[in-house]
Image: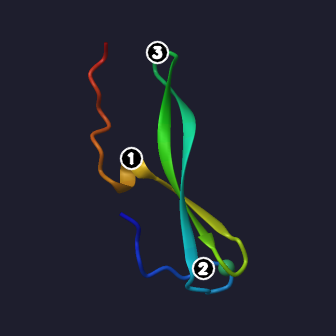
Amino acid sequence: MIVLDFSCLKCGHDKYQVKTTFCAEKTPGFKLELGTYYLKICMNCGYTEMYSAKVLDKDEELKPEY
Ligand SMILES: [Zn+2]
C-alpha cells in the first residue's frame, strides 16, 4: 500500500513511520464521510507526507447514493 523506496524530500533520510488518520470529508449532498489517510513521517526531521488511502488502495470511490 505504501511506496517503499521512501526518501525524505527535505533531508533525504530513509527511515519513516506510517500512521493512519481519519478526516471528515464533505460529500455532495452534505453528508459527512470519514476519509482514510496515510501519514508518512520522516524519522529524522519530522517532515510529513499525506496520502489519500482512497486513491492509494484504489478503493471503489463511487458508492451508490442512498
Ligand atoms: Zn526528513
Q: Which-is-in-front pick, marks 3 and 1?
A: 1
Q: What residue type is labelled 3?
A: Gly
* Secondary element at tag 3: loop
* Secondary element at tag 2: loop
Q: Position of residue 6 (x, y in %)?
A: 49, 79
Distance in Å between CA atoms under marks 3 and 2: 38 Å
Q: Where is residue 53 in the image (x, y as percent from the top left)?
A: 42, 51
Residue at horizontal 27%, vertical 40%?
60
For ligand 1, the image quadrant comes to: bottom right
| N-terminal label among 3 and 1 | 3
Residue at horizontal 69%, vertical 81%?
44
Residue 54 tag number: 1
Q: Mark 2: give few (<14), some (14-19) or many (20+) Cα within 10 Å.
A: many
Residue at horizontal 29%, vertical 27%?
63
Residue 8 tag number: 2
Vertical order, 66 against 54 (above or below): above
Taking the image as shown, residue 59 lies to the left or right of residue 31, namely left
The quarter in which the C terminus is drawn is top left
Q: Which-is-in-front pick, marks 3 and 2?
A: 2
| N-terminal label among 3 and 2 | 2
Q: Which amino acid does label 1 sit on?
A: Lys
Residue 29 tag number: 3
- State how the image is colored: rainbow
| N-terminal label among 1 and 2 | 2
Distance in Å between CA atoms under marks 3 and 1: 19 Å
